[in-house]
Amino acid sequence: MLTCATLQAQQDQINYDESKVPDYVLPELLVTSAGKTITTARQWEQLRRPELLELFASQMYGRTPDDSGVGVSYELLTENTAALGGKATSKQVKLIFSNGQKKLETLLLLVIPNNATAKVPVFVGYNFKGNHSTMLDTTILYSDNFALVKEPGHPDWERGCQASRWPYEDIIDRGYAVATMCYHDIFPDKPGLKDHSVVSLFKGYGAAPEAPDEWQAIGAWAWGSSRIVDYLAAEPRVDTGKIAIMGHSRQGKAALWAGVQDTRFKVVISNDSGEGGAALSRREYGESIARVSSIQPAWFCPAFNQYRGKEQERPFDQHQLIALVAPRAVYVASAVEDRWADPKGEYLAAYHASPVYHLYGLKGLESSEMPGLHAPIMKDIGYHIRAGKHDVTLYDWLRFLDFADKHFGK
């Protein structure tokens, strides 16, 4: 078990000095394990992409299990056609997952613009502090799992306490719907609550020891994002051909993994995701593998622990993860004061993913030099770095909307 002293030692070893970034060589993106150079999109899809997908599943995020034994049903709890001062309709939907013996209930909040004359594109994304935290509306329900992670009276119970991260009116005014759920509903992010996660519904749960590729929290969150998309397929006002996923911080990691696995996400957005997300591990700047893989409950599969302190020995890195989204659009966002997430490493991973986009005749990031503050790049791979700290701001959302507009033809 990791002690407080161990965790503090890891924290003290975090590098924030660019001059101490080691010389590194990235794993090959377009060369197969057998040494074959990839020169076409077809070769990428048939030869190299499956190899890389297997590496990330077996050695980092865990293998998503067969979910045929886990069913889902939906229950519409509320529908408010006058949400946001009449601009939108809000729906609260209970998703009930069951394996025939055990059930797990989650709450989805869907906000749809009222003035649309056609089906609308939608942003899918988890919130951190409950649906109630995203707006002041007193009709928004609290989820059961939130009571497991926060004691009554905690400030996170306050309605709208993270409303700044969810500028609904700006999103609705641009013609987009929002589908959000508290990430604790899928996998409570607190030690000892795995029995309350969707993982507990799957065959083989609780077996000891865990398999090296056993999925954990990030894998479960990614799976849950896809289940939101399943529900949206039945929403007549949502254009399921225009679905974007946005994740911040740990959910930025999960959004990338969800986007890699589920091609229904046509735009994949990672905000301040850092180590285990968009940032290159080999830079050894900011959060380390040792630190991120020590968090409990575990985010990554047990096999990932072998790379603690061995960033240069890992046979894959995050530029390859970003490349796995191709040919769909991917956007990486950073904040200049968020050194923990290594903004330069996030940019370089996106840059080094670009050769795969070129195979499709698409445009990636053409320079290894980062853009300046508030100078977003809007190609098939997009990027911006803004002023400020680790957060999701209105500036971020306006750029995400611009990027989605470009790729959804709005």
Image (cartoon, rainbow, N blue to C red):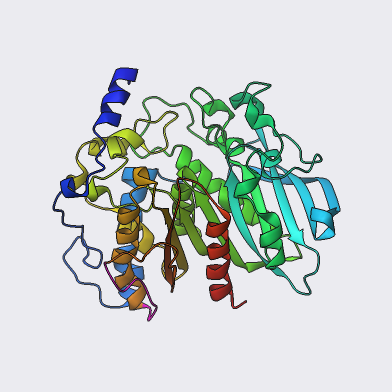
Compared with 33, 98 (above or below) is: above
Q: Which residues are magenta?
A: 360-368
- Where residue 197 appears, as percent x and y from the top left, is 56, 33
Residue 215 falls in image quadrant: top left
Compared with 29, 303 (above or below) is: above
Give me the residue at 39% from left, 46% from top: 338
Q: Nearer the viewer, residue 246 or 342?
A: 342
Give me the residue at 19% from left, 69% from top: 36
On the question of residue 66 being in view, the answer is: no
On the question of residue 121 being in view, the answer is: yes
Residue 246 located within the stretch drawn in magenta: no
Q: Quadrant of the C terminus?
A: bottom right
- Where residue 89 appears, as percent x and y from the top left, is 80, 56
Residue 362 located within the stretch drawn in magenta: yes
- Dominant secondary structure (helix, strand or loop) of the stretch shown in magenta: loop
Give me the residue at 63% from left, 21% from top: 151
